[in-house]
Each structure stands twice: as structure tokens, then as C-alpha cells.
Image (cartoon, rainbow, N blue to C red):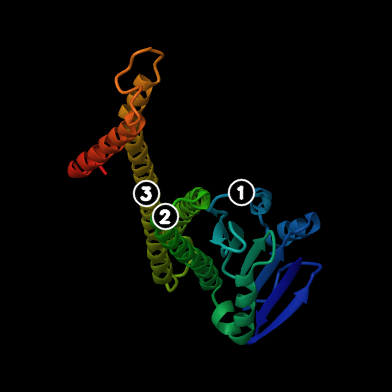
Amino acid sequence: MLRLHLYSGGHVTVEEAPSRLGPWPDGTRAWIEVVAPTDAERELLRAGLGLHELALEDAARVGMPPKLDDYGDHLFLIAHSALRADHGGTRKLALFVSKHWIVTIAREPLPLLEQLRERVRREPEMHFAHPDHFAYEVLVRLLDGFEERVDEVMDHVEALEDRALEGISREITHSLLELRSEHAALLRTVRGQRDMVSQLARSTHPVLSRRVQPYLRGLADQTLRVYELLDDVRDNIAATRDAYLATINNRLSETMRVLTVIATIMMPLTLLSGIFGMNFARIPGLDSPWGFWSTIAAMVAIAALMLAWFRKREWI
């Protein structure tokens, strides 16, 4: 799908599946919104706007990390945004930015572009007058997705920490492993995006006006804060894992201590029963009517004395 938004004379016109792109009259600004482009649409972008075929391939490729490339009269960016927990993962967005137009290429519809489209319709001059500022607005919304997802992960980690202190569950182990895997993916993506935004904020490319530089520096600081938050999340996941392992070890130690006490108490009782179970013709007390009950009484007394001794030594 390819949609062309043209701004001229204070008005925006939208054209679905245009047959050509550019050149446009002076003062015209354009936003070319592309979702899951076909080969014909990629050729239209290449022929109409002069986009490099390698950049178009990177825009369509799955798993491309954040990057910034200079193509002379325009910049090429790849940025990501995190989705909410019910969707999971991240989504890539490619941007081509020049002085007169901006191109966004996504593999599937993104809610943030739908929201931006509504704002463009309400305030076209604010967004279309400066394509570099339009690109900044897109990057801000992409970063908002990371901030929301980091908050969700933090809440999940705190809930797991409370459950880890309550008891042992295989579900906790599974959730911790999933969180650690997701955190590693988020950290890797945000690290690349932090470097890309920092490079963009320091760039002196003619596409980027002086008025947008303070906004880009603020965006770089905000991206760094998200990266630092992810560092905190990593520490919290590690602390939760350690607390859970400590809970398991404490429970195991308690179980082993109880089993050791039982086994220790049973040892002298087994010795007594073994002695009186030997096949000798003469054993003291064997013929006495009180012999059996005396043996049982001795076993009970020995067990009670051992329990009292263990409690005095605070072994149980």
C-alpha cells in the first residue's frame, strides 16, 4: 500500500496508489506513507524520488537494527518501537527524509502512524512545513512505545518478586526466563537506537535545520534514559531471580533438616529393634512379659531425649 499526502497552500490532499511521485511545485511538501511495499511500489519510489535500491532492500528486510545513512540529498533511518505485552516484540520503521518530502516504510500497519495521520489532518502546517521536524515527531512516538513497554516489564518483575517470596512455582521460573529473553532483545534494540539518535543529533546534514537540533538532542537524552531504565530492569530481574533461588534453597534446607532429624532419631530405635530381633536362644528380657513394653518405652524415651537435645541446640 502506498499513500501520498501532499501539502500545498495550507491544504492537504491524499492520493491512494499514485501513478508517479514528484517532481512537485515549489513550496509543496509530501509524506509518502508505505506499508508492505510491492516490487512495483519500490520501483516507483526509486524512480520518482531517487531512493537507493540498497536502502529500499534494508527497509524491507526483517531484523535490520537501527541505523542512519547519508545519501546526499536525503537521510535514511531505521528505527524501532516496542509493542505492548499482548502483542510482544518490536516493529521496524524505515524513514527517508529530505528537505521537501518524507517517506515512511513499514512491514505492517502501525498504530502510531495512524495517530500521526490524524494529527497531520488537524494541523497540517505544523507537520508538513519542516520534514525534519516531522521525522522527529515519528521518532518520539517510536520511543514512547519503548517507555510504555519498559513500564510494563517493571510491573511484571515486581509482581514476580512478590510471588517468588510466597512460594515455589514452575511458572515463576518460566516467566523469569521469558522476561530475561525479552529484556535482552529490548536492550539490544534500544542500544542501537540510542547510537542512531545520538548520531542524528550531532549531524550537520543540510536536511536537518538548526531549529530541529535542540529537539533531536532532547530525544537523544530521552533515549539514553530509556536505556538506563532497561539497565535497572536487568538488575531487578537478577534480584528477583536471586530471591527466588534463595527461597528454593531455604525450602530445600528446611526439608533436608527435617529429614535428617527423622533419620537420626530412627537410628538408635533401629539398633534396639535389631538387637532384639537377633536369633539367639538367650536374650535378657526375652521371656519377660514386660520385655516388649520395656523396649518400646526405651525407644520412646530415646526419641524424646534426642528431640529435646536437638531443640536445645536449636537444630530444629
Residue 304 appears left or right of 45: left
- Considering only order in the chain, which callout, 3 or 1, is on the residue closer to the N terminus? 1
Tell me the residue that label 3 is attached to. Answer: 247
Tag 2, which secondary structure?
Answer: helix
Tag 1, which secondary structure?
Answer: loop
Cα separation, mark 2 vs mark 1, equals: 34 Å
Mark 1: give few (<14), some (14-19) or many (20+) Cα within 10 Å.
few
Residue at screen point 37% across, 49% down = 247
Q: Residue 144: image x %, image y %?
A: 49, 69
Cα separation, mark 3 vs mark 2, equals: 7 Å
**Foreground label between 1 and 3:** 3
- Considering only order in the chain, which callout, 1 or 2, is on the residue closer to the N terminus? 1
Amino acid type at circle 3 is Thr
Please identify the quadrant where the N terminus is shown.
bottom right
Amino acid type at circle 1 is Gly
Tell me the residue that label 2 is attached to. Answer: 164
Residue at screen point 70% across, 65% down = 34
185 w.r.t. 110: above or below: above
Amino acid type at circle 2 is Ala
Q: Residue 306: image x %, image y %?
A: 24, 37
Front-most of residues 26 and 268: 268
Q: How many marks can you see?
A: 3
**Foreground label between 2 and 1:** 2
Label 2–label 1 contact, CB within 8 A: no
Tell me the residue that label 1 is attached to. Answer: 63
Q: Residue 88: image x %, image y %?
A: 59, 59
